[in-house]
Structures are given as C-alpha cells and as structure tokens.
Amino acid sequence: MPAEQALPAATTLADALQVPLTLFEVLPNYAYMGSAVWPGMYYAPTPEQDAEDEKAVTTYLEETARKLGVPGREVRTAWQRSVTNRADDVILDYLADRPTGLAVMTSHGRSGIARWVLGSTAEAVIIHPPCSVLIMRAGIAARTGPEPSRA
C-alpha cells in the first residue's frame, strides 16, 4: 500500500518529537461509486457491507499499529468514511481539529492525463493545510531511509 511507505518517516518524526503517531484511513462511500455494468447507475451499500468494511479497516489499522509499537511510542488509529468520496475533504477536516499536528502522506506522483482524470489527494491537502504536511512520493519513499552506518 503506497501510504505505508510514509511510515518510516512518520515514526522517525513521532519518536524525535515525542508525540503520538496516528494512523488514519478514509473509507470510500460506495453510494458515490458508479456501476461497471450500468454506467451512470449507483447502488446503495448494505449495512452488512458497511460493517464488513469498517471491521476490515479497524483490523488493518490495529495490526499496523501493533507492528509499529515499541516502548515509548504511542500509536493511535482512526478512520472515517467519506461522504463525497473525496479523501482530501475528510483528511482536511480531521487535520483541522489538530492544527499543531504534522501530517505525513505519500503521493502517487501522477502527471499529465492521469493526474487530470484521477486528481491528487496530496495536492488538495497542501493547498490550504490546517497544519504542517510532509508529502513523500510513493516508490521513492520506499527506497529512502537512514543511511547505513559505515564502520
């Protein structure tokens, strides 16, 4: 998952600043997703589907937090479902309640038509961020890390 590539930087910053690390995920709103069979048609998710999605994201976040847990590091988890199916709106609302925080996220680094069609959550977040934001390009973030020690 591209977002996981920002975890080394996020944990390093949280440890250095001695602040809690919060893993945050935005769930899509399936009512806004078009049908592949009938373009332009939308379907309402069932309560069972919503509950299954919520259980899956909770399990994923808790497992990831467990892997990141070390003595002295507090790892929290949170998720919210998008109303408009845009993650940037949800992220900005979440960060607005934490103006002294620091958001660390990855970007796919799309350009051209792909960026125009798909948009950029990272770009939307950094236009008017309520707190500091560190954006790392997916792929590059995975290759970077602490320099190996040279003896």
Image: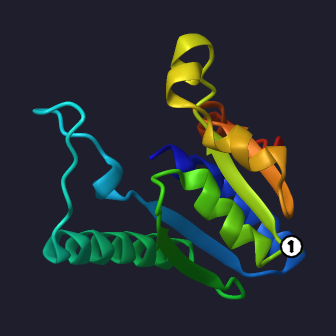
- The kind of residue tagged 1 is Pro
Residue 48 x %, y %: 14, 76
Residue at image x 58%, y 70%? 23
State the image quarter where residue 110 is shown: top right
Specify the quadrant that holds the C terminus. Answer: top right
Toward the viewer: 94 or 1? 94
Residue 149, given in percent of the width and then of the height, sits at: 80, 46
Number of on-image labels: 1
Could you say which is closer to the camera, residue 70 or residue 18? 18
Report which quarter residue 133 is drawn in: bottom right
Quadrant in the picture for residue 91: bottom right
Position of 121 relative to 130 (above/below): above
Colour scheme employed for the rendering of this structure = rainbow
Helix, strand or loop at label 1? It is loop
Residue 70 visible in the shown view: no
Query: Where residue 30 sits in the image (x, y, percent)?
Result: 29, 56
* Residue at the top extreme of this rendering: 112
- Does residue 13 show up? yes
Q: Residue 107: where, in percent of width, then height? A: 63, 38
Q: Is residue 92 left or right of residue 138?
A: right
Q: Residue at x 49, y 73 (%)?
A: 79
Front-most of residues 129 and 63? 129
Vertical arrangement, residue 103 with respect to residue 37, above or below:
below
Q: Residues within 10 Å of mark 1 (few under 14, many from 20)?
A: few
Q: Residue furthest left?
A: 37
Q: Is residue 44 left or right of residue 74?
A: left
Q: Residue at x 72, y 38 (%)?
A: 123
Q: Which residue is mark 1?
A: 99
Give the side of residue 58 with respect to residue 149, left or right. Answer: left
Looking at the image, which residue sits at the far front?
Answer: 40
